[in-house]
Structure formats: C-alpha cells, structure tokens
Image (cartoon, rainbow, N blue to C red):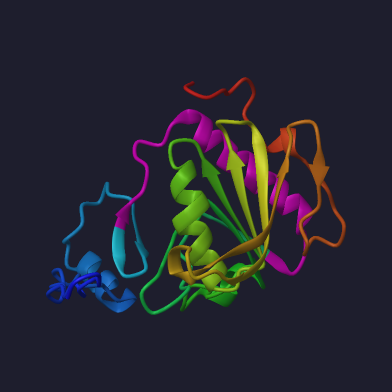
Amino acid sequence: MSGAQQAVVRPPERAGPSRRLWSREEFHRAGEAGLFGPEERLELIGGEIVQKMTPQKTPHATAVSLGEAALRHLFPQGYYVRSQLPLALSAISEPEPDLAVVEGAIRDYEHEHPAFAVLIVEVADTTLTFDRTTKAGLYASAAIPEYWIVNLQDRVLECHREPGPMPDQPFGHHYRSITRYSEGSAMAPAASAGRHVAVADLLPRGVRQGV
C-alpha cells in the first residue's frame, strides 16, 4: 500500500542443537568409570564439565594456602575450612572453590559433600572474568551469603554480599553489594564474629599482573 509500511514476516528461527547437561550423579559415575584422567582437575558448573586452571601457578597456590591459614584463624570453632574440595550446590553443580567455610566439622561430611557455605573464596589471576561472572552467578543462585575474589592481578580483595535475582547475569543471579578492599586495608567476614583479616595477609608478596 502506498505511504504505508508493510509488515516484514520472518521465518521462525530454528532452534540450535541442544546441549546435553550432566547431573552430579552422572559426573561421579563417569569419574568412577575412568572417563576422566587422574591428572584432570574438573568441576561441574550448571551441568557442564569445566577444566580448572592447570598447571596451578605458584602465586595462586600460595594465595590459597595464605587464605586457608587466615580463615582457620577467623573461624576457630564450629566451622570447617575446606580447600579445593567439592560443594554439592545443586543436582547439576558441584564446583570446587579454592576455599569454602562450612558449618560443623570434618566428620559431618563423611557421607556427602556440604551443600552450603557461609563464605566461598576464589583466587583469581587468569580466571578473573570467569570468577566475577559465572562463578559469582552460581554462588549467588545457591544463596551463598558472602563470596570473595582474591584478585592477584590488581592485588585487591573483592567482597560480594547480598545475593539476589539478576536476570541478565549467569544463572539469573548475582550480588547486589561488591566492595573492593585494597592491599593496605582490613575487613571482617560477616560470619566471623568481628574478627578481621588484613588483605595483605591474603596476597603473595610482589605479585603483579603478568607475573
């Protein structure tokens, strides 16, 4: 029609190939069947098997050890600090965060991995973007109240709190409060009864971006 715009009718988009997601039970069975190599460091994130950073660089390993020592001091009783061990967050997610503080004691988890943590810590160098997006969305969707990123690139601690729905983020969730603590500052985890940790105590000495 003259002077009018004609509607453009587009053919329906064809759906792409569907992804086959893994459950935690299938993930465990595959490992028991020897489908994964003994040297592989894998974790299950939203039904997908993700290869963790390997080999683990010395600054990363040092920061994990420093963080573990600090958290054991901050949470002396009634809590268990787990280092690079699984968390059963959902039927399709079993991440292995660098550190997780869970309630109880070691023997409380002899038969099943914990499904919740009061604090999760990831040490980030090459994985910084992944830890800020995918990992943050996953932990927020599991209602983990506090999530730290020990940022080796910028030598800061990024503290995430107040998990909640955010439709544009991975897993539809993220943290409403994100505070960066510089190397010269100190802070207290929400569940640590006011005990503080110096950010410098979580960082290897002299580590800069690209080192």
Quarter assignment of residue 65: top right
Q: Residue at x 59, y 38 (%)?
A: 151
In this picture, residue 38 sits left or right of residue 33: right
Q: Residue furthest right?
A: 194
Q: Residue at x 75, y 59 (%)?
A: 75
Residue 84 in view of the camera: no
Residue 46 in view of the camera: yes
x, y percentage for residue 181?
Answer: 74, 41
Q: Is residue 61 magenta?
A: yes
For the image, the number of numbered tags is 0
x, y percentage for residue 209?
Answer: 52, 24
Magenta stretch bounds: 50-79
Q: Is residue 76 magenta?
A: yes
In this picture, residue 44 sits left or right of residue 156: left
Query: Can you say which quadrant of the picture contains the N terminus?
Result: bottom left
x, y percentage for residue 93?
Answer: 40, 70
In this picture, residue 28 sits left or right of residue 33: right
Q: Nearer the viewer, residue 134 or 113?
A: 134
Q: Residue at x 12, y 73 (%)?
A: 14
Q: Residue furthest front?
A: 2
Q: Nearer the viewer, residue 165 or 65?
A: 165
Q: Residue at x 87, y 57 (%)?
A: 194
x, y percentage for residue 17?
Answer: 13, 69
In this picture, residue 73 sits left or right of residue 158: right
Q: Nearer the viewer, residue 37 or 46?
A: 46
